[in-house]
Image (cartoon, helix red, strand yellow):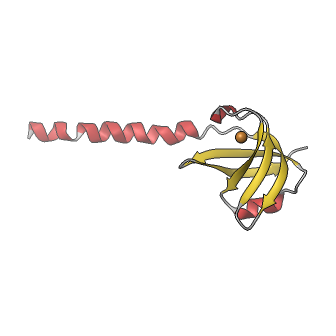
């Protein structure tokens, strides 16, 4: 009976460790950028963006995936925007975007 108790320990510890990870990576600040190209068909957007500290990325122009193509209706080419990007299985995915003043 005593042995059985210890068997559960590693399971509990790893469950705790995993549950704390999403909370940490959810500190997503918005990044400023300018829309260069919108590819609604493929749910992609090209943005010249400022430094993204959460991803340790310097300013550059690059293509992002968007989680929801409807986000692309909110912005236009040439517009200054603020957006939130997360890393999702090796892809960089924009999960929110809005026009910036
Ligand atoms: Cu970049």
Horizontal side of residue 66 vs 5, given as left or right: right
Q: Residue at x 48, y 38 (%)?
A: 21
Specify the farthest residue to the left. Answer: 1
Total number of numbered discs in the rendering: 0
Horizontal side of residue 76 vs 90, given as left or right: right
* Residue 65 point in image, percent of width and height: 68, 55
Which residue occupies the foreground of this view, 42 or 31? 42
Q: Image quadrant for the N terminus? A: top left
Q: Image quadrant for the C terminus? A: top right
Quarter holding residue 19:
top left
* Residue 77 point in image, percent of width and height: 88, 55
Horizontal side of residue 34 vs 97, given as left or right: right
Q: Residue at x 68, y 31 (%)?
A: 53
Q: Residue at x 84, y 50 (%)?
A: 35
Q: Is residue 40 above or below residue 5?
A: below
Horizontal side of residue 74 vs 43, given as left or right: right
* Residue 69 point in image, percent of width and height: 72, 63
Q: Residue at x 80, y 40 (%)?
A: 32
* Residue 87 point in image, percent of width and height: 59, 45
Specify the farthest residue to the bottom. Answer: 41
Q: Is residue 65 above or below residue 3?
A: below
Quadrant of the rendered image holding ligand 1: top right
């Amino acid at each position: 009976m005593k042995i059985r108790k210890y068997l559960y320990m590693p399971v509990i510890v790893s469950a705790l460790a995993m549950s704390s990870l999403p909370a940490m990576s959810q500190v997503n600040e918005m990044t400023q950028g300018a829309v260069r190209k919108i590819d609604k068909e493929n749910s992609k957007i090209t943005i010249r963006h400022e430094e993204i500290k959460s991803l340790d990325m310097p300013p550059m122009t690059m293509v992002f995936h968007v989680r929801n193509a409807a986000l692309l209706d909110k912005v236009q080419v040439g517009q200054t925007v603020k957006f939130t990007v997360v890393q999702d299985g090796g892809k960089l995915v924009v999960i929110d975007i809005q026009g910036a003043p």
